[in-house]
């Protein structure tokens, strides 16, 4: 093959690579938008709770989005999270969240149905956060940047201890953006473990 063909193939490969990278970047950005996250029926309760939280509305006017809390910032962990999330979108489209039609249009019945699964869903999210040392939390909150004197008395007392003991954010801050579920007991716990 002559030099001109190599140059054309090289340029074509480079442009294809740039195009692929731009596509990945665009898809990642679009699927990180809150509007995308709440387009699923199953996220409506989460969204309403989030709107009542300090992460949505606060004195400083800084808003943490769904992706800020649930999607890692680093490239490879982000891509892993996106690949694993494909199953959630797939099951949403299939209707595998097992929400009967009569429940979908009745807010009270839907919430009751949702509450049956809340503990298990929360446990899965908390486990991911703990495993990553609350990396998404720490992308905004950093012990070293905290002015303990400006915090509430409880936070001023607990944050230095948490820092010393190597605790991670989710160890203490469950239910910060969504209602913290009650741990099921008795028959409810057995039913959840069978799903």
Image: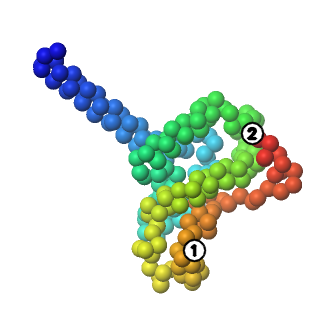
Q: Pointers 2 and 1 in contact (CB under 8 A)?
A: no
Point 56% across, 66% down: residue: 168
Depth check: give the residue in front, 51 or 26: 26
Point 57% across, 82% down: residue: 157
Q: Which of marks 2 and 1 is in front?
A: 1
**The C terminus: image quadrant:** top right
Q: State the SS at label 1.
A: helix
Label located before the other in sequence (2 or 1): 2
Residue 182, above or below 46: below
Judging by the rendered image, the residue that carries numbered circle 2 is 103
Give x and y (percent) for residue 3. 12, 20
Give x and y (percent) for residue 144. 43, 74
Point 47% across, 63% down: residue: 138
With 157 as the anchor, is 28 left or right in this view?
A: left
The crowd level at tag 1 (other Cα within 10 Å; few <14, some 14-19, many 20+) is few
Give x and y (percent) for residue 125. 61, 52
One can see residue 41 in this view = yes
Depth check: give the residue in front, 19 or 57: 19
Q: Which mark is residue 165?
A: 1
With 155 as the anchor, is 61 left or right in this view?
A: left
């Amino acid at each position: 093959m002559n030099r001109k063909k190599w140059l054309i193939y090289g340029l074509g490969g480079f442009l294809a690579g740039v195009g692929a990278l731009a596509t990945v970047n665009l898809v990642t950005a679009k699927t990180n938008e809150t509007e995308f996250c709440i387009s699923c029926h199953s996220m409506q309760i989460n969204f309403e709770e989030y709107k009542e939280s300090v992460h949505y509305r606060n004195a400083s006017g800084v808003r943490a989005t769904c992706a800020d809390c649930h999607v890692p910032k680093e490239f490879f962990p982000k891509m892993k999270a996106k690949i694993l999330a494909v199953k959630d979108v797939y099951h949403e489209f299939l209707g595998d969240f097992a929400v009967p039609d009569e429940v979908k249009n009745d807010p009270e019945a839907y919430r009751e149905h949702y509450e049956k699964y809340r503990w298990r869903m929360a446990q899965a999210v908390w486990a991911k956060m703990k495993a990553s040392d609350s990396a998404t939390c720490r992308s905004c909150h950093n012990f070293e940047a905290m002015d303990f004197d400006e915090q509430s008395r409880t936070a001023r007392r607990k944050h230095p201890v948490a820092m010393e003991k190597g605790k991670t954010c989710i160890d203490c801050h469950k239910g910060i953006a969504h209602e913290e579920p009650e741990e099921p007991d008795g028959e409810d716990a057995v039913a959840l473990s069978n799903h």
